[in-house]
Image (spheres, rainbow, N blue to C red):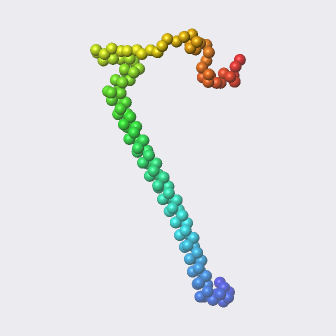
Amino acid sequence: MRAVLRVLGPSRLLLALAGLAFIYLVFTGVQHTLRLGELLRQEDEVKTETVALEWDMERLQALREYFNSDEYIEGQARRILGWARPGEKGIIVTGPPRTEAQEIPRETPIPGSRWWEAFFQD
């Protein structure tokens, strides 16, 4: 240490130490600034995701309320079960009768319905 003091002198040694401290402070400051930028970006992403999830939650709650409503239950009973209120008459709408050429034989599968059979036939 005394040899360094003799060669550099106390003022130059102090200046070198101050320079090293300055470089260290700049380096850590840049690191903290970069980390802060990353954290702010992550915060923005989380806020955006939170808003989207809150919107989804509100939409799902509205759907739940609708599905529990009498209007929805009655509509499903009419559509699926064919129920009608007293005094109402049901109407069945049919198309023109099919000819034999229009009929699809039940033994013939619909193209693409069983695609795997093309690969695994006996």
Q: In the figure, 69 relative to 28: above or below?
A: above
Residue 55 in the image, given as x and y percentages of width and height:
41, 44
Q: In which quarter of the image is the C terminus?
A: top right
Quarter of the image that includes the N terminus: bottom right
Based on the displayed image, in which of its 4 quarters is residue 27 positioned? Answer: bottom right
Does 84 sit above or below residue 39?
above
Q: Where is residue 104 in the image (x, y as percent from the top left)?
A: 58, 14
In the depicted structure, whether residue 121 falls above or below residue 13: above
**Residue 76 seen in render:** yes
Q: Is residue 106 visible?
A: no
Say left or right for 117 vs 76: right
Front residue of 8 and 46:
46
Quarter of the image where one finds residue 91: top left
Residue 41 place in picture, x, y as percent: 50, 57
Q: Residue at x 61, y 82 (%)?
A: 16
- Give percent across and percent down for residue 39: 50, 58
Q: In this view, does 8 lie to the left or right of 81?
A: right
Relative vertical location of residue 69 with respect to residue 2 in this rendering, above or below = above
Residue extending furthest toward the right:
122
**What is the quadrant of residue 11 in the picture?**
bottom right
Determine the residue positioned at 55% across, 66% down.
31
